[in-house]
Every structure is written in C-alpha cells, then in structure tokens.
Image: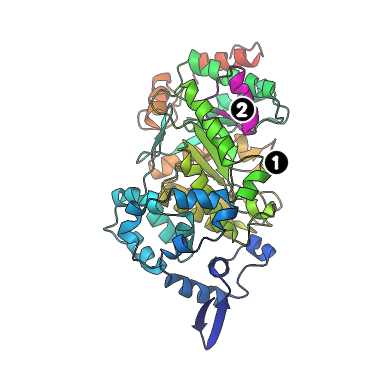
Amino acid sequence: MYTQTLGGRTYHFADLKSLMARATPERSGDQLAGIAAASAEERVAAQLRLADLPLSTFLEEPLIAYESDEVTRLILDTHDRAAFAPVSSLTVGAFREWLLAYTTTGERLAALAPGITPEMAAAVSKLMRNQDLIAVSRKCRVVTRFRTSIGLPGRFSSRIQPNHPTDDPRGIAAAILDGLLHGCGDAVIGINPATDSPQAVITLLELIDELRQRYAIPIQSSLLAHVTTQLTAIERGAPVDLVFQSVAGTEAANRSFGIDLALLREARAAALALGRGTIGDNVMYFETGQGSALSANAHHGLDQQTCEARAYAVARHFAPLLVNTVVGFIGPEYLYDGKQIIRAALEDLFCGRLMGVPMGCDACYTNHAEADQNDMDTLLVLLGVAGCAYIMGVPGADDVMLNYQSTSYHDVRFVQTTLGLRPAPEFEAWLLDLGIIEPDGRLAHREQPRLLLQAVAQLAGTGATG
C-alpha cells in the first residue's frame, strides 16, 4: 500500500502498478481499463508519491510476476547492475533531476542504458513535462547499422511505406519511386503486405532487391508480414534484409501476436545467417504501440504507457536496426486526441532512447480520432528537435491499404530542411551522385533522374520508359 496526503486528503494506492497508473498523464486507454486517476488532484498525489520512490524498488517489486511472464524474466535476468550503479541510490524524482542536469551527457546516458529497466523509464517519464522528455531524448544517441547508419547526430531518416490494397507491384513501385525522388527511404523500404502469402512477400522483396542492386542504392527492405511468413520466405531463398515483427510488453500480449521470445531468437539467427548487411548486422525491425496489450486483454492491470516501455525491453534484447512506435494507429479508445497522441509519442521516444533503443515514430492518427494533420505537423517538429531516428514517408500521408493518416515524403523534407537535418550519410552520398539533391541538401530543381524512372517502370512491368 502506498499513501500520499495532498490538500488535506490522503490518497491510497493499493500497489506499485496502481501507483504507476494513477500517476500517468490522462489518456483514454487507461480510463477504458478503469485504472486511471479519478481526478487531476489524485494524479498529482500519485506523482508526488512516485517521486519519492527509490528506483531500486522496480528491481524488488516486479509489476508482473517473474514466474508468470517471460518479459519480466527477460527484464530482470538481463539487468546490468554495474551500469545501474551511478543512479542506484536515487529516487524517481532525483533521477529526473539527474537526467536533466547539464552534466549528464550523452556518453553517460549511453553507459547507463543497460541498467535502466522499462519500469524505471516509464516512472520517471510520468514526472516530466513535454520539454523535459525532449531535452533528455535529444541527449541520448543510439546508432545502428545495416546498409545505412541510423541515428547519427544531425541526421533524420525515413521509411518509405509504399502500401497497396492489392499488393500490385506497379502501384508499389510507383510509390517507391516517388519516395526515392524525394530523398526518402534511408531507414527502410517497408511494405505492409495486404496478404500474408509467402509468395507475395517474396515477389515484393525481389522487386526491391533488383532495384537496389541495379543502381547500387544503399537501402534495406522489410516486408511487414508475420515473422513465421518471413521465415518461410528465408527458407525459399528470398532476399530478406530486416525481419519484422510487432511486439508488446507482456508474454500474453505477444502470444496474441502469435510470437514468443524463442521465435524471435530463431528469426534473428536466420537473418544473421544470410549475412546481407554491408556495414552492420542489426537485422531486426520492431513496431509497438500504446494500447496493444490492453486490446488483447493482456495488460495485467498495468497502464498502457508502462506496458509500452516493457515492449522496448523485448526490442532491445534483439539489437534491432529500427523500432517504431505507431503512436496513434490503434485509435481514440487508447489515445483520444492530438494532445494525447503528442504526449504518448514523446514518452515513447524518451523511454526507448533512455533504454538504448533506436526509436522512430509513425506520427499518425485514425480518421475517427480527435486529431488532424496540424497535430502531426506539431509532433513532427517536436520529434525532429528531440532527435527521433526516423519517421514514415507515405504517399500523400494517406495509407490507402491500412486506412489511417500518417506523414508524407514532403513531411520528411520539411523536417530535414527546417531543422537542418540530413539523411543517413551512405544514402545522402547516393542522392548526391544521382543528382536528386543539391550539396546543401535541397531537392534538385532539374529533370528527375531518367534512369531511375526507367528502372522502376521495368521492374513493375509497365513497359514505360520514363
């Protein structure tokens, strides 16, 4: 039992998970689960009590029992106590002050990352304003590599997301071309296939790989089918670069996705055995999102943000190239409006980067949420300032297959030019060589590269010549 007196009233919190839930900034998912604070005053009382809690408590009181959850076991069994030592005597509130101190550099945060559990990261985030989350995220530096380097200082990458409702290679190829000519795609060309057919996955992987090899484009691809489908594709000789899987923060939620940690280990081993990376071996790509555990009735009474942070422990264990919080995708049942979406995105970025995870963000919303593209514009700028690794590039910001609103190729250009950021260096060199961008990073104002147009047309089977 945890108690806190505020304004002449004493608030009681039954256990640590209740305290964490009540301290969480307002969001519709926790209200739906019946675990949110009943008032702003109760939320402040919970935050005050949480601020006085020793960080080490999270090692002594697992929020989900060690015996019943393999994610809990992963978190505790892999915890690096030596890395944790510099902050082991701090309370959650003192940890916030330590993180914000000017003397706490990126190097110190990188050394600390293996010692931070997701529950510690989630707890301190609940005491932070948005600007605090941005300030600390910006100091964290997480760099990963496959064919491009993701997360370097001054760089901002993008995923080309050329989805098509029927997996038509012509439509997908056109969207890839559009993205490349806007200077996008250095994080990954990632397609959400309309079906989970291994042959459809193989066909699209071969299309991207032929284009990549023909024009020596330093990119990596990923088909966002279920991990078992991708393993089948590998067995059939498909050119698989990054193995994708959605992951969550509890064993039961992962089981609802049809996965467990053993399957992810098998997938990573299969991808590593292919040896397709040229400058690194980060071969995994994970997506997450607040509310996924609750939607599967697998949250164990935890607030959705803490569950989300636990998913980053799963991701961290497999040394991924990319992790992406699809922040507003599930809908207003979990993040009601633009304000909640923006806050959740900044929390996710902070928690992931503090834990040493290469975080990107799909700044997105569904059509029935109380949000619009202006909210995403605001979030884009905040993510760029906070050092987010990458965002999505969707044609027109409207995903016609998944039926939600995201960010466009133009939005990628906006963030890069407005904030003085550049693509990954390997990809930037290719863009310069092909004349797609000018030396100062602007898109070239000349006829677009004809050879690339012809190549994509041929691969798509259109017979066009540009």
> Which x, y percent locates residue 89?
33, 65
The circle on residue 403 is 1
> Which x, y percent locates residue 158?
49, 36
The number of discs equals 2
Q: Residue at x 67, y 24 (%)?
A: 198
- Residue wearing tag 2: 230
Of tags 1 and 2, the one toward the viewer is 2
The circle on residue 425 is none
- The three-letter amino acid code for the residue at tag 1 is Asn
- The three-letter amino acid code for the residue at tag 2 is Gln
The answer to which image quadrant residue 24 occupies is: bottom right
**In the rendered view, does 231 fall on the left or right side of 180?**
right
The residue most toward the front is 67
Task: Answer above or below: position of 222 versus 253.
Answer: above
**In the rendered view, does 22 fall on the left or right side of 193?**
left
- Specify the quadrant that holds the N terminus: bottom right
Task: Answer above or below: position of 28 versus 164.
Answer: below
CB atoms at circles 1 and 2 under 8 Å apart?
no
**Residue 378 visible within the image:** no
What's drawn in magenta, residue-wise?
222-243
Is residue 30 found inside the magenta-colored segment of the image? no
Q: Nearer the viewer, residue 121 or 88?
A: 88
Q: How is the image coloured?
A: rainbow
> Which x, y percent locates residue 233?
62, 22
Q: CA distance from mark 1 to mark 2?
A: 24 Å
* Label located before the other in sequence (1 or 2): 2
